[in-house]
Amino acid sequence: MEFADDILIAGIKRDDYACCNQLFMRYYSRLCAYVFNLTHNYSASEDVVQELFIRLWINRQKLEIHENISGYLYRASKNAALNFIRAEKSRQKLIQNMPELEWQNDENLIEQIEFSAALNRCIGQLPERSRDVFMKSRFDGLKQQEISDQLGTSVKTIKNQIWKSLQFLKACLELHEAFEH
């Protein structure tokens, strides 16, 4: 039996996996086609949409959709696709800067590249503010006080955002690893 989208979302919030599966089946192929138009990569479009539904299920308890689910899913998949494109450009740049023989023969380096790509995808899934704070902390080397001063917020808020980002990234990377094996 098919239910309306709002009934499915309510079911997902009540931990009803069948509702999540029905929503997945309803939108999967349409979202893949939409993401493919952005990425021009069929495999990536499938990955992006699957990860979207995984995040939807993981975050089901705090799920708040203030529009129709279709619009929400299309917007979320567009954002995820754009994050994928950014991560892919970064990965391509990294590969281009490596000597050819090194990366063909060194399995550790290949694992590092795969990890870096997964990490970039996970970072791309962070909310914009959290991603900004995390990048300033970990990649720009700014101290928490400096970030706090730049963003006009408390150091405690910055610490919390970094901690939550690290927790999310850990879970996200564990998910990537689980799906690869």
Image (spheres, rainbow, N blue to C red):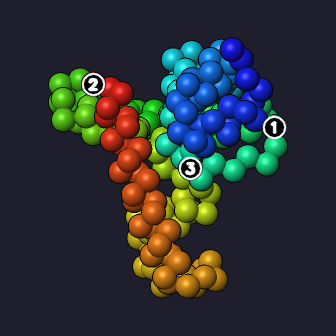
Identify which amino acid the numbered label 3 is placed on.
Gln
Identify which amino acid the numbered label 2 is placed on.
His
Q: Decide: few, some or many residues near mark 2? Use Cα within 10 Å; few <14, some 14-19, many ≥20.
A: few
Residue 145 image label: none
Disc 1: which residue: 68
Q: Quadrant of residue 96?
A: top left
Q: Nearer the viewer, residue 115 or 106?
A: 115
Q: Nearer the viewer, residue 19 or 129?
A: 19
Residue that appears at 49% across and 43% down: 58
- Dot 2 falls on a residue whose secondary structure is loop
Quarter holding the N terminus? Answer: top right
Q: Decide: few, some or many residues near mark 3? Use Cα within 10 Å; few <14, some 14-19, many ≥20.
A: few
- Dot 3 falls on a residue whose secondary structure is helix
Residue that appears at 50% across and 84% down: 155
Q: Decide: few, some or many residues near mark 1? Use Cα within 10 Å; few <14, some 14-19, many ≥20.
A: few
- Dot 1 falls on a residue whose secondary structure is loop
Q: Is residue 176 left or right of residue 77?
A: left
> x%, y% of residue 123?
48, 50
Disc 2: which residue: 181
Q: Is residue 116 left or right of residue 43?
A: left
Counting residues from the start of the chain, the first of labels 2 and 1 encountered is 1
Disc 3: which residue: 61
> x%, y% of residue 128?
62, 57
> x%, y% of residue 138?
40, 64
Q: Is residue 147 left or right of residue 78?
A: left
Q: Marks 2 and 3, how far apart in space?
A: 27 Å
